Amino acid sequence: MDPASLALFGVAISSGLASIGSSLGSGAAAKSATGLLAKEPEKFPQALVLTALPSSQALYGLLYGIIILLQTGLLSGELKDGVTTEIGMQFLASALPVGVACLISGWFQGIVAASGMRIIAEKPQNLNQAIVLAALLESFAIFGLIISILIAFVGIKIS
């Protein structure tokens, strides 16, 4: 496989897996929100906040995909000199930490946010508790992004 294809596969892994995680998470939260809003439509702003929380994982995957495109020169349409098949494979592998971390954390963040709808239903003044509990899972996506960025900027040497 040529280096550009390998790097592009890395972009697909980081952005694709992260987007799937955000979709699963936001979907789970939205499903719970519809039940809440059927009875109490005035709680839409609080439900929207919890439903939107898992969407940030897709942003992290997209960000890392753009980093790969910039590092390899593919964003400008021309592969940088020195990007070999080995380098392409390294970029592909470097997309796994952020992709997998965002997939799983986004999915579970949505599950926690869905459970947080009960807090809104019973004690809407405690919305912050629901947000904090769901936001805890965000840190794992950030850890994956940091590892991928370190690999791209420190571990991969383009001659």
Image (cartoon, rainbow, N blue to C red):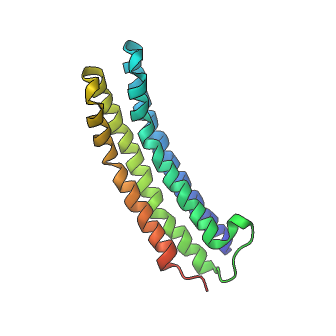
Q: Residue at x 50, y 46 (%)?
A: 20
For the question of whether residue 1 can be seen, the reply is no
Task: Estimate the x, y position of residue 51 in percent, counting from the top left.
Answer: 42, 34
Q: Residue at x 59, y 57 (%)?
A: 12
Q: Nearer the viewer, residue 124 or 4?
A: 124
Task: Estimate the x, y position of residue 115 in percent, counting from the top left.
Answer: 30, 32
Task: Estimate the x, y position of residue 30 in percent, counting from the top left.
Answer: 44, 29
Outermost top residue: 39
Q: Nearer the viewer, residue 75 or 105?
A: 75
Q: Nearer the viewer, residue 95 or 136?
A: 136
Quarter where residue 158 is shown: bottom right
Outermost bottom residue: 159
Examine the rendered structure and indicate whether residue 136 appears above or below residue 52: below
Quarter of the picture holding the C terminus: bottom right
Outermost front residue: 125
Q: Residue at x 63, y 78 (%)?
A: 85
Examine the rendered structure and indicate whether residue 47 appears above or below residue 37: below
Outermost right residue: 77
Q: Residue at x 54, y 57 (%)?
A: 63
Q: How many marks?
A: 0
Task: Estimate the x, y position of residue 68 in percent, counting from the top left.
Answer: 59, 67
Q: Is residue 2 left or right of residue 34?
A: right
